[in-house]
Amino acid sequence: MAVHIRLATQEDIPEIVDVSMAAFDPSTDAISARLFPAHLQSTDSEAFKNWSVTRKSARLDLKNSVVMVAVDDALNGRIVGYAMWFSPIPEGSEEEEPPRPKVAFEGVDRDALMELRQIMEDDAHNSFGEKGSKDVWNLDSLGVDPQQQRRGIGKMLLNWGVQQANEQGKDCYLVATPSGLPLYEAAGFKTTRTVDIFGVPHVSMTMKHSTK
């Protein structure tokens, strides 16, 4: 397979956004459908992409943010998948708050966005106590180009983070979408609880670091 993974750079962000928009299209993804409802959308698709690029660019700059991309050499180095991880925050370090995008986008339901943030924060605290996800490898988002699925790309991106966690003696944590659940179960993640996100059951999952 002519696919390899590497650390993402700021120059990769537009391609990452393209993959994300295809992988989490509002027509198939419940979270995207709620965050970007049809009645708020305009015909200016570039406005949404610019907002997404600015948002993901800011996330990449966070000290504990690690973004990996899967690159297909047979497609002239095109990015065909990505994973956005948050690494553990060292004891005594200040947790960074993700900067707010300076590019305004009127197509996002801001109340739904705040609700989603609260749901995710509550689940992390339910899983790990007061520290939340600060002491684990947290998979924030993993997306694969729909036209490139069933090639093991998602597995490669997931296994990279699991390996980092094992090497550091840390656990892994994520909240799985219904479509992503089989990948995480096959990798060995265990269900902690079901999390209702906008009326759709998602699954909070953890993988304890290997002691072998």
Image (spheres, helix red, strand yellow):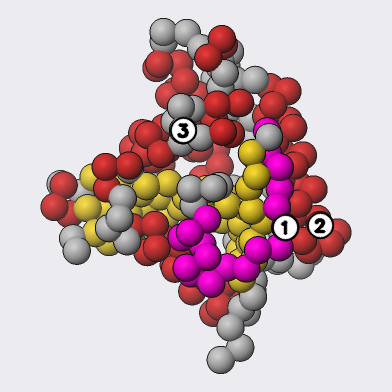
Residue with the mark numbered 1: 193
- Image depth: mark 1 or mark 2 in front: 1
User: What distance separates the C-alpha of mark 1 from that of mark 3?
Assistant: 23 Å
Cβ–Cβ under 8 Å for marks 1 and 2: yes
User: What distance separates the C-alpha of mark 1 from that of mark 2?
Assistant: 10 Å
Seen in the image, is 106 located left or right of residue 127?
Answer: left
Seen in the image, is 144 located left or right of residue 174?
Answer: left
Outermost residue, right side: 130
* Sequence order check, earlier mark of 1 and 2: 2
Looking at the rendered structure, the kind of residue marked 1 is Arg
Q: Is residue 21 visible?
A: yes
Binning the other alpha carbons within 10 Å of mark 1 as few (below 14), some (14 to 19) or many (20 upward) gives: some
Binning the other alpha carbons within 10 Å of mark 3 as few (below 14), some (14 to 19) or many (20 upward) gives: few
Looking at the rendered structure, the kind of residue marked 2 is Asn
User: Relative to 177, does residue 47 appear above or below in the rendering?
Assistant: above
Question: Toward which corner of the image does residue 124 lie, by quadrant?
Answer: bottom right
Residue with the mark numbered 3: 28
User: What distance separates the C-alpha of mark 3 from that of mark 2?
Assistant: 28 Å
Residue extent of the magenta highlight: 181-198
Which residue is pictured at 13% across the width and 52% down the height? 74
Question: Whole-percent x and y of residue 90?
Answer: 70, 66
Nearest the eye: 160 or 14: 160
* Sequence order check, earlier mark of 1 and 3: 3
Residue with the mark numbered 2: 126
User: Relative to 47, does residue 212 appear above or below in the rendering?
Assistant: below
